[in-house]
Image (spheres, rainbow, N blue to C red):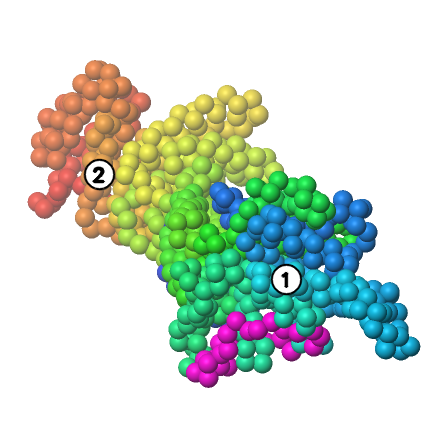
């Protein structure tokens, strides 16, 4: 966020910059910060709004539903636990059975024999048929005998007696129907067809007038059911079609009830389970819909002591216990021939269906792409009996809405405040908490709560914020390098990008230190050289000067021909700005001296340089017009620094520092040069020559320095003789030091023309 606060300024003022300008100062970064911040907020809130609109159905996003389905499948696979005792078995029309009994359908006598064996020999509890017996099974011989009995032999009593005995065998549907009687047999049928064929079983319930039309049951218009003789002989029936198939064709949900002409019919699985439980009465548990006063929400089905969670259309999530073949498959021929151990089927619930190629009813499930349809019913029956059906409550949409709203708002306002690593950590933490809590609720309470939408929202908001921040930061660093790259070292640009709170472009008052350098007699030098050679000369000494300033964390303000202006303490704060500036001045002086051999080898003149360093309050920021601006400094302390550089020639020294700098760097030894009043200033200031770190100044220099300062004291007290004595002695020891001769000349002048009574020991300079 700190970087964004700075970079917003660049985005905001792009329209006011020309190709050659750096940045305008007409708009402060704070306005730009608001724009950038609100832009990030708006984008994140917009994404959150799309998710919320999806939840309430205002703006459906199919992709989110697809992800939610996939998330459900993943949790199902992750938490699979097989039932400890499976009560359901599958009687299978497999290839082995077809090989011995011929193609399907088999004659109904065989079916009757299988049913008889299951109940009489194997003593199963109940059986459900995942097959519709919609067509009659008539023998050709029976048709001929029927024609004879109704024709020429209708009066032949002996024939009629034999005919009656034969027909009891040849009418196979009757035989099959008799095998179904007085046994817990459940016939399967199909709803939602274009015809009405066969006979429906008795409905499980007739809707009361108070709820009729208020529960959004699936309402098919047709059916394909079993022969009347078979359905009337069976115990009950149930549908095995699935109108709740998901859009991706996966069997995740299946209805337990469908409404047909005001009556409710149960699914094959529910009918089988309820029959195995001694057929307890079915109860509907509903509550009023908060969105529609005329509609009630179906929440549960209750059969005896078992409560089954359902959705508003009476659908359940199929409680898969494992991949296909999780239940025992028994070949139908083995049941017919009684070759399967009888003890293994006692009190079991049987489902009759087909897995042979060509007959196999394959479905796509969350567990496998091809899954036998009959085993889906087996999973539902087992789940009802074990009460392991997952519940996706009606309030899950409201919960999802609230969760998305909270997550969206938190991440929207939190992520812009965090560094990328912390933002990633925060997002991953929220993701982990949602996943862990969701799976915990799934396993402990059998609740299916939304997970894909909140996870996707977190990823999208994080990606948006980090991508936005990345491109803004990348652009900002380019802008930062463009603005400051030629003035500060690259490593300082990187540091600035991490500490943008310290940078204020609109201008502020800071205590800083300024440095000025100027080549002496440069006009004479330039007049004696060709332009190209002069350019190489200038580059030859400006490059090492710039390098030193960069090494000491300084900012180049500008190049003025042969002169350089630099400052310390901005754009990044520097608690040791005076020390760094003074060290730069000392190193520049030494560096220029080291250039002498190289310049002589090129035939260039020797370069001598004057440097001033001054510390004080300065106004720093972008200064200029709408066409061009500079990041620069202004103020009295800057002007004084400039004046002091011009005095280096007067006093014959390489470096002059102001008194504020002298006090800010106590570790250095200084020679006080004078008290001066520069042009534009009425108040005198003390100026100093830095000699180096105190520990590096030898005793002889320190002794001479003490003597000179004593001479200055006598001079300012108008004790001309005492001052002359001290300074003259020093001038004999150091004849090349110009400062001594300056004071000796002043003493001679003041003896003849004493200064006025109000004289404070300072000297005035009228020139810049």
- 729 displayed left or right of 387: left
Residues rendered magenta in the picture? 196-221
Q: Is residue 317 magenta?
A: no
| Residue extending furthest toward the right | 152
Q: Is residue 199 magenta?
A: yes
Which percent across, then down, holds residue 60? 55, 68
Which percent across, then down, holds residue 760? 13, 42
- 364 displayed left or right of 10: right
Q: Residue at x 57, y 73 (%)?
A: 202
Foreground of the two, 232 or 514: 232
Kindly state the secondary structure of the residue where label 2 is placed. Answer: helix
Q: Residue at x 57, y 51 (%)?
A: 124
Q: Residue at x 61, y 48 (%)?
A: 121
- 153 displayed left or right of 573: right
Kindly state the secondary structure of the residue where label 1 is placed. Answer: helix
Mark 2 vs mark 1, CA separation in Å: 116 Å
Q: Residue at x 41, y 35 (%)?
A: 549
Name above or below for residue 527 compared with residue 61.
above
Main SS of residues in magenta: loop
Location of mark 1 (residue): 180
Which numbered disc flags the more N-terminal residue, 2 or 1? 1
Location of mark 2 (residue): 659
Residue 570 falls in which quadrant of the image? top left
Foreground of the two, 129 or 166: 166
- 217 displayed left or right of 584: right
Name above or below for residue 579 compared with residue 120.
above
Which percent across, then down, holds residue 565? 40, 43
Res 59 seen here:
no
């Amino acid at each position: 966020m700190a970087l964004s606060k700075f970079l917003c300024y660049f985005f905001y003022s792009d329209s006011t910059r020309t190709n050659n300008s750096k940045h305008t100062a007409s708009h402060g970064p704070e306005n730009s910060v608001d724009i950038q911040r609100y832009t990030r907020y708006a984008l994140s809130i917009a994404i959150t709004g799309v998710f919320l609109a999806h939840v309430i159905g205002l703006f459906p996003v199919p992709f989110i539903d697809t992800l939610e389905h996939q998330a459900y499948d993943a949790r199902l696979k992750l938490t699979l636990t097989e039932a400890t005792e499976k009560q359901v078995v599958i009687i299978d029309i497999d290839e082995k059975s077809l090989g011995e009994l011929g193609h399907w359908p088999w004659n109904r006598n065989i079916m009757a024999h299988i049913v008889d064996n299951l109940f009489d020999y194997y003593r199963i509890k109940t059986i459900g048929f995942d097959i519709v017996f919609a067509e009659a099974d008539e023998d050709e011989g029976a048709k001929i005998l029927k024609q004879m009995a109704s024709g020429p032999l209708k009066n032949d009593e002996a024939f009629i007696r034999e005919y009656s005995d034969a027909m009891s065998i040849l009418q196979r549907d009757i035989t099959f129907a008799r095998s179904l009687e007085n046994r817990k047999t459940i016939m399967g049928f199909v709803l939602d067809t274009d015809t009405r064929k066969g006979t429906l079983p008795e409905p499980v319930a007739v809707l009361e007038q108070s709820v009729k039309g208020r529960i959004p049951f699936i309402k098919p218009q047709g059916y394909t059911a079993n022969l009347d003789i078979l359905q009337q002989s069976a115990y009950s029936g149930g549908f095995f079609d699935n109108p709740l198939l998901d859009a991706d064709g996966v069997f995740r949900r299946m209805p337990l009830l469908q409404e047909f002409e005001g009556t409710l019919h149960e699914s094959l699985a529910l009918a089988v389970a309820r029959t195995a439980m001694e057929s307890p009465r079915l109860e509907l548990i509903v509550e009023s819909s908060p969105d529609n006063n005329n509609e009630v929400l179906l929440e549960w089905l209750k059969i005896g002591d078992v409560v089954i969670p359902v959705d508003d259309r009476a659908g359940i999530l199929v409680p898969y216990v494992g991949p296909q073949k999780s239940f025992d498959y028994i070949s139908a021929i083995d049941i017919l021939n009684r070759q399967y151990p009888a003890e293994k089927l006692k009190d079991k619930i049987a489902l009759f269906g087909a897995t042979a190629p060509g007959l196999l009813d394959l479905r796509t499930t969350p567990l496998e792409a091809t899954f036998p349809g009959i085993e889906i019913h087996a999973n539902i029956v087992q789940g009802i009996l074990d009460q392991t059906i997952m519940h996706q409550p009606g309030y899950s949409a409201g919960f999802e809405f609230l969760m998305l709203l909270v997550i969206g708002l938190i991440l929207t306002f939190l992520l812009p405040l965090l560094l990328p690593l912390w933002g990633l950590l925060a997002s991953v933490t929220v993701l982990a908490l949602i996943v862990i809590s969701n799976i915990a609720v799934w396993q402990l309470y059998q609740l299916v709560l939304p997970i894909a939408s909140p996870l996707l929202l977190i990823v999208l908001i994080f990606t948006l914020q980090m991508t936005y921040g990345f491109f803004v930061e990348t652009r900002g660093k380019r802008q930062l390098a463009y603005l400051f790259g030629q003035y500060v070292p690259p490593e300082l640009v990187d540091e600035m990008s991490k500490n943008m709170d310290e940078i204020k472009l609109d201008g502020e008052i800071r205590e800083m230190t300024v440095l000025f350098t100027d080549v002496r007699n440069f006009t004479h030098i330039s007049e004696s050289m060709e332009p190209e050679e002069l350019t190489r000369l200038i580059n030859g000494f400006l490059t090492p000067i710039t390098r030193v300033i960069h090494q000491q964390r300084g900012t180049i303000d500008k190049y003025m021909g042969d002169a350089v202006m630099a400052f310390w303490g901005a754009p990044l704060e520097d608690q040791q700005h005076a020390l760094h500036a003074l060290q730069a001045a000392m190193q520049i002086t030494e560096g220029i001296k080291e250039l002498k051999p190289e310049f002589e080898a090129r035939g260039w003149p020797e370069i001598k340089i004057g440097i001033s360093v001054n510390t004080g309050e300065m106004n720093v920021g972008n200064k200029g017009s709408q066409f061009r601006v500079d990041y620069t400094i202004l103020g009295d302390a800057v002007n004084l620094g400039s004046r002091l550089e011009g005095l280096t020639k007067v006093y014959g020294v390489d470096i002059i520092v102001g008194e504020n700098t002298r006090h800010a760097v106590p570790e250095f030894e200084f020679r006080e040069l004078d008290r001066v009043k520069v042009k534009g200033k009425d108040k005198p200031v003390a100026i100093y020559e830095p000699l180096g770190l105190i520990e590096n100044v030898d005793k002889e220099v320190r002794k001479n320095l003490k003597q000179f300062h004593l001479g200055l004291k006598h001079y300012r007290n108008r004790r001309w003789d005492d001052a002359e004595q001290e300074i003259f002695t020093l001038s004999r020891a150091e004849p090349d030091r110009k400062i001594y001769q300056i004071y000796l000349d002043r003493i001679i002048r003041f003896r003849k023309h004493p200064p006025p009574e109000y004289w404070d020991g300072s000297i005035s300079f009228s020139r810049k």
